[in-house]
Image (cartoon, rainbow, N blue to C red):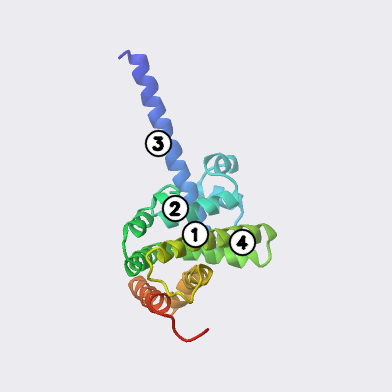
Amino acid sequence: MPDQVKRRRYDSTRREAKAALTRENVLGAALALFTSRGYAATTARDIATAAGVSLDTVYTSVGRKPEVMVLLMERAISGTDEAVPAEQRDYVRQIHAATTAADKIAVYAQALALVQPRLAPLVHALSQAAATDPSCADLWRSIAERRRANMATFAADLRATGEVRTDLSNDDVADIIWSTNAPEYYLLLAQQGWPPHRYAWLLTEMWTRLLLGPPIADA
């Protein structure tokens, strides 16, 4: 291989590595500021200063502030350095592979115990800002709606096992799971000293007892 080609490849690899490091610095700075100072109180310039880069670099490496927040949330959910589509996440595949409703619930509860410590502080920062900032409210609403849509899919997956209570509609099941797996619910328990593994136990017990088996008292 000619030396000139080797140099070009080497230079390209170095540029990509530098760009990746810059992106991580920006995201790390944003995460620290959003969860300590709050989303609304943090500007894109604050993120740039904390990351030691220019404002334009924040925009080109990640995006504007809402895009930064969305990416941080996606990373928190996936547990990786990148956003991962829902159907490609390991725990979603495990849920689909499980054959009983109880197993599907257990897998999801365990996954939430890993996700919520990363995700809940970000959601809390955004929800506080949503009270006074219309753009934050729009972002918050879109995230909540996407969560609800995902729970509708999960409810249908549970229903397909034939083990879900017949007196509960799929919407009922989705609403119950959506409300009780909310990051705010996790934070309330965390403030009372509940560790993630106990949170997972609670969700498993609650959903299994409430959603599965024969109909119970009329709601």
Q: Is residue 40 above or below residue 18?
A: below
Mark 1, secondary structure of its residue: helix
* Mark 4: amino acid: Arg
Q: Depth-wise, is mark 2 or mark 4 nearer the camera? A: 2
Task: Tell me whether the residue at label 2 lies in contact with that at label 3, contact meaning CB atoms closer than 8 angstroms.
Answer: no
- Whole-percent x, y for residue 119 in the image: 46, 62
Mark 2, secondary structure of its residue: helix
Q: Pick the residue in front: 73 or 181.
A: 181
Task: Tell me whether the residue at label 2 lies in contact with that at label 1, contact meaning CB atoms closer than 8 angstroms.
Answer: yes
Which residue is farthest bottom?
217
Q: Circle 3: is it few (<14), some (14-19), or many (20+) Cα within 10 Å?
A: few
Distance in Å between CA atoms under marks 2 and 3: 27 Å
Q: Badge 3 is on which residue?
A: 17
* Mark 2: amino acid: Ala
Q: Badge 4 is on which residue?
A: 141
- Whole-percent x, y for residue 137 in the image: 65, 61
Q: Which mark is residue 150?
A: 1
Query: Considering only order in the chain, which callout, 4 or 2, is on the residue closer to the N terminus?
Result: 2
